[in-house]
Amino acid sequence: MNKDTNEWLHDILKDVQIPSEDIPNIDLYMDQVTTFMDTRLAETRRYPEDKILTKTMINNYAKNHLLPPSEKKKYSKEHILLLIIIYRLKNMLSITDIQNLLEPLTEKYFPENDSKDLSMKEIYDKLLQETTKRHPDIEEQVLKDWSDSRDSFSDHILSQEDSDYLDDLVFIYKLCYDIYIRKQTIEKIIDYRRQQQASADQDQSASVTASDKKSADKRKGKAAKKPPTSLL
């Protein structure tokens, strides 16, 4: 790997994060939210015309229960924390999977609840801490994969153009395989959690039904024992 390629890959692998302390502590209107996200995550765009977040996206997230509704058309810091998490997840997961994954988060920690020992901000900070800590290892592995994929077909007589193409094909395929395995794992965990929740909901529903039936039977028993009212 030459110096230019090394620098190019390092630039591609740059970690773009938004620390929670950089998020305004005041509620924002939708236009302010989209501007904030577009500005802070501009470097993650693939193409200059790409939008990080739009009003339509926010409305769709709310419609699909990924994002709690705004309060008087304003969005809190917790809203923005959730929007950043959704932005990170949406390139890998379906809307349904994100909804299933984040539903407990929005139910238990949104809005900020002083009665709970853990806040949305603390959860976001932990996610940020773990991904930031992990990034150097990912970068190192990607750089190694690039280096290992060079001259993949050195035992064949190829033009430089064909050799470069096949090297890139091997490199990209290796990256895609990593993503494939991780995505399969993520989906299976989400499916397992969904099944567990559905089973718990079913058990709870059955318990409530049985309790209601028992109460109804008890009321019927009392009614049967009550002496008839005398006719005048």
Image (tube, rainbow, N blue to C red):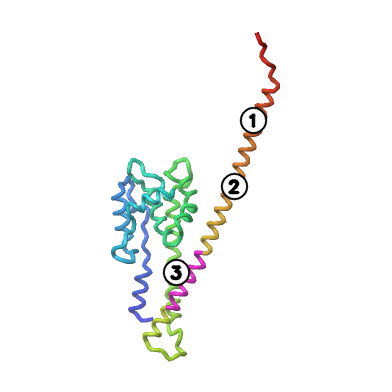
Q: Position of residue 141 (x, y in %)?
A: 45, 73
Give the alpha-carbon distance from disc 3 to disc 2, as whole Å. Answer: 37 Å
Point 40% across, 85% down: residue: 163
Point out the tag, 1 or 3, that comes first from the N-terminus: 3
In this view of the protein, which residue sits in the foreground, 155 or 43? 155
Q: Can you tell which mark lies on residue 200?
A: 2
Q: Residue most toward the front?
A: 232
Give the alpha-carbon distance from disc 1 to disc 3, as whole Å. Answer: 61 Å
The residues colored magenta run 169-183
Residue 55 vs 152, above or below: the answer is above
Relative to 38, 93 lies left or right: right
Q: Crowding at label 3, few (<14), some or many (≥20) Cα neighbours within 10 Å? A: few
Q: Can you tell which mark lies on residue 138?
A: 3
- Magenta region's main secondary structure? helix
Q: Position of residue 2 (x, y in %)?
A: 36, 81
Residue 150: say if magenta.
Answer: no
Q: Crowding at label 1, few (<14), some or many (≥20) Cα neighbours within 10 Å? A: few
Give the alpha-carbon distance from disc 2 to disc 1, as whole Å. Answer: 24 Å
Q: Amino acid at mark 1?
A: Ala
Viewer-nearest of discs 2 and 1: 1
In this view of the protein, which residue sits in the foreground, 123 or 110? 110
Give the labeled residue for mark 1: 216
Could you say whether the residue bearing mark 1 is in a helix, strand or loop?
helix
Q: Can you tell which mark lies on residue 9?
A: none
Residue 142 vs 99, above or below: the answer is below
Point out the tag, 2 or 1, that comes first from the N-terminus: 2
Q: Quadrant of the N terminus?
A: bottom left
Q: Quadrant of the C terminus?
A: top right
Q: Residue most toward the top?
A: 232
Q: Amino acid at mark 3?
A: Ile
Q: Position of residue 63 (x, y in %)?
A: 41, 48
